[in-house]
Structures are given as structure tokens and as C-alpha cells.
């Protein structure tokens, strides 16, 4: 059985990718994920705010005491040539790429097209196979237009693509007014792949303490339908790779995403819930499903249930919405 697939131009031994999260930040866990069958690993995100904080701290240290003696300025290197990025993350990239044979994908989380662009170059130099841009941007400014939001995504991508030569994927949320057109814009701007979708962590309210709660709720299989819809719509219409994310709890979700047209399937919550050894369970579950149906390659499966290939493409459109509601009556 051949599970090999291609993602961002990289050859993966299978379509299972450990998504960015706390578990992928430790070298021992990274090795174990490879042993349990992961096809690739996305490291935890490095945040734009972290990079900016390090830069501000350095500038503060350089400025402190600089006026106390004319020679003090010569004690410090020029800030433009000094590495202000968080060194531990670059070290993680280096050690991870040396420790395993599967692709290591770094992750940058930010909302502007400056500050972290130069750091993308340093990540490439550290040996990352690819880069995932996690643009976690919530347009809380009510005067910001949808076009402004889309332009920010495109500008960030273009700035990074001008800086690096490794493949770049964009992880985006589902709340664009025209998700398909946004995907096309990103591909035209140079995106090698799209990760669908980013989960925005909304706050809740503690009624007892009258305080906002900022807790993390792991995804469940019930959340698969929205990314499944858009992967099914986009598959075969874009040249960019499609990565499915959210709601992967079992091999069933992996198969569904592949049938819709995903090139790879990412999971984070299931690994946090069950442990890194669960990667083996997912891989064996996929193999078992394929073997029972005598399917030898993923290419013969992938996209079979995309909008372009199903007998009733209206299942992806408004007509199906109407049919469902009429069925309830």
C-alpha cells in the first residue's frame, strides 16, 4: 500500500501531519511522532509579539547608559546587524531537522508584514523544510473593510515570499465573505499551500466571577464540516496544496478529508487528548480503511468526493441547504 503524498512540493511518506502545538515543541516528542508514523511535523508558532519584545528589549539595553560616556556607544553592536529574534526557536528548528528525516515545517504567527519577515529568512537558514504563516487576525476595528482584511493577508504573504525560497503555506480562518476568491488571491500572491482552517479562540464569560475566560477548547469531530465543505469546493481548482485542519479525532475524519481533496490532514487536539502515540492509531486506522476496500494508493482516493467529482455538486451549495430544511418539515 502506497501512502506517499506531496505537500508544498515536499514528498511525505503519508498524509498525516502533526499540527502546530505544545507537543511539537520538544525534541523527544518530535522523534516519537516520527516513530509513530507522522508524515511531517509543524513546530509551535513563534509569535510576532515575541520577536518585537526581544527587539525592544535589545534597543533598551543598548540605550541604557549610552550617554554616560562617549565611548559607551562602541560597547554595543549595531542593532541592524544583531540577531534580535528569539534564539531558542531557531535552535529548535536546527535540532529538529537534524533529529528526524521527515519534513519540519516552522510556523510564524503574526498580523503585520514587518517585524517577523526577516525572521522568516533566519528560519529558512536554520533548515526548515517549509514555513506556515498563521495569520491570526481578528478585525475588531469596525471601520476596517473586508478588502482591507484581505489586503493584509496578501501583503504579509508577499513580504515573506520575497524573503524566503522554501515553500510557504497560509493558515487562514473561514470568515471571509468570499473564501474561494480569497484562496485564489493567496495562490496568485505565491502561496504554495493553504491550511483550512485556523480556529479563533473566542472568550467566554464566567458568570460567578463576572470575568472573561480565555481557556482552550480542543476541537472535536463535530467541527469537520466547514473545512470539509471548502476543501471539497477548492480541490482541483487550485494548484496550491490543501491541508485539512480541525476536527480530526479518528481515521474516519482523515478519510473524509482525503475524499474531499485534501493533500494532507493535520491533527493537534487528538494528540493532546490521547498522547503522541495516537499518531500510530490514526495511521493504522487509515491503512485498515484502505485495505478493506482494496485501495492501493491515495491518488485513487483523493478528491473522489470533491465538488467537481460528485454526481450531485449541489450538495456543496445553497440547494442542499434548502433540501435539508424541507426534509426537517
Image (tube, grey):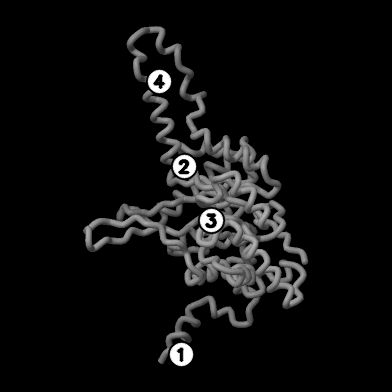
Q: Which mark is residue 327?
A: 1
User: Between tags 1 and 3, which lies in front?
Assistant: 1
For this view, does 102 lie left or right of residue 173? right
Q: Quadrant of the C terminus?
A: bottom left
Residue at (57% x, 51% y) in the render: 169
Q: The residue tagged with tag 2: helix, strand or loop?
A: loop
Residues at marks 4 and 1 touching, judged by CB atoms closer than 8 Å: no
Pointer 4 or 1: first along the chain = 4
Query: Which image quarter: residue 52?
Result: top left
For this view, does 213 lie left or right of residue 254? left
The residue tagged 2 is 113
Cα–Cα gap, marks 4 and 3: 42 Å
Considering every residue shown, the one lying at the far bottom of the view is 329
Q: Is residue 13 above or below residue 258?
A: above
The residue tagged 3 is 185
Residues at marks 1 and 2 touching, judged by CB atoms closer than 8 Å: no
User: Between tags 1 and 2, which lies in front?
Assistant: 1
Cα–Cα gap, marks 1 and 2: 48 Å
Residues at marks 1 and 3 touching, judged by CB atoms closer than 8 Å: no
Residues at marks 4 and 3 touching, judged by CB atoms closer than 8 Å: no
Residue 222, percent from left and from top: 48, 72
Residue at (67% x, 40% y) in the render: 98
Question: Is residue 206 shown to the viewer in this render?
Answer: yes
For this view, does 77 lie left or right of residue 99? left
Pointer 4 or 3: first along the chain = 4
Question: Is residue 167 shown to the viewer in this render?
Answer: no
Sort mark 1 into few (<14), some (14-19) or many (20+) by Cα contacts within 10 Å: few
Between 162 and 6, the one lying in front of the other is 6
User: Between tags 4 and 1, which lies in front?
Assistant: 4
Query: Which image quarter: residue 207?
Result: bottom left
For this view, does 314 lie left or right of residue 239? left
Amino acid at each position: 500500500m502506497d501512502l506517499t503524498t506531496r505537500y508544498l512540493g515536499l514528498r511525505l511518506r503519508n498524509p498525516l501531519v502533526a499540527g502546530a502545538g505544545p507537543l511539537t515543541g520538544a525534541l523527544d516528542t518530535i522523534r516519537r511522532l516520527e516513530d509513530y508514523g507522522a508524515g511531517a511535523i509543524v513546530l509551535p508558532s513563534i509569535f510576532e509579539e515575541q520577536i518585537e519584545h526581544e527587539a525592544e528589549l535589545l534597543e533598551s539595553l543598548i540605550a541604557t547608559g549610552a550617554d554616560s560616556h562617549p565611548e559607551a556607544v562602541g560597547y554595543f553592536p549595531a542593532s541592524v546587524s544583531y540577531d534580535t529574534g528569539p534564539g531558542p526557536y531557531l535552535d529548535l528548528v536546527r535540532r529538529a531537522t537534524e533529529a528526524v528525516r521527515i519534513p519540519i515545517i516552522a510556523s510564524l504567527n503574526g498580523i503585520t508584514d514587518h517585524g517577523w519577515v526577516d525572521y522568516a529568512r533566519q528560519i529558512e537558514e536554520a533548515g526548515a523544510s517549509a514555513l506556515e504563516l498563521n495569520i491570526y487576525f481578528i478585525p475588531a476595528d469596525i471601520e476596517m473593510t473586508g478588502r482591507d482584511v484581505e489586503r493584509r493577508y496578501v501583503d504579509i504573504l508577499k513580504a515573506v515570499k520575497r524573503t524566503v525560497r522554501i515553500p510557504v503555506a497560509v493558515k487562514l480562518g473561514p470568515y471571509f465573505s468570499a473564501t474561494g476568491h480569497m484562496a485564489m488571491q493567496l495562490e496568485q500572491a505565491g502561496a504554495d499551500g493553504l491550511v483550512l482552517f485556523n480556529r479563533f479562540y473566542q472568550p467566554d464569560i464566567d458568570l460567578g466571577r463576572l470575568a472573561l475566560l480565555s481557556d482552550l477548547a480542543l476541537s472535536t469531530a463535530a467541527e469537520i464540516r466547514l473545512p470539509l465543505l471548502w476543501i471539497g469546493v477548492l480541490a482541483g481548482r487550485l494548484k496550491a496544496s490543501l491541508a485539512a485542519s480541525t476536527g480530526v479525532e479518528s481515521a474516519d475524519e482523515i478519510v473524509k478529508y482525503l475524499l474531499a481533496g485534501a493533500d494532507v490532514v493535520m491533527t493537534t487536539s487528538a494528540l493532546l487528548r490521547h498522547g503522541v502515540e495516537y499518531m500510530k492509531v490514526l495511521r493504522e486506522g487509515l491503512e485498515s480503511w484502505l485495505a478493506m476496500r482494496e485501495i492501493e494508493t491515495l491518488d485513487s482516493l483523493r478528491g473522489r468526493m470533491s465538488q467537481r467529482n460528485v454526481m450531485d455538486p449541489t450538495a456543496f451549495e445553497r440547494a442542499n441547504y434548502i433540501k435539508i430544511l424541507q426534509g426537517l418539515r
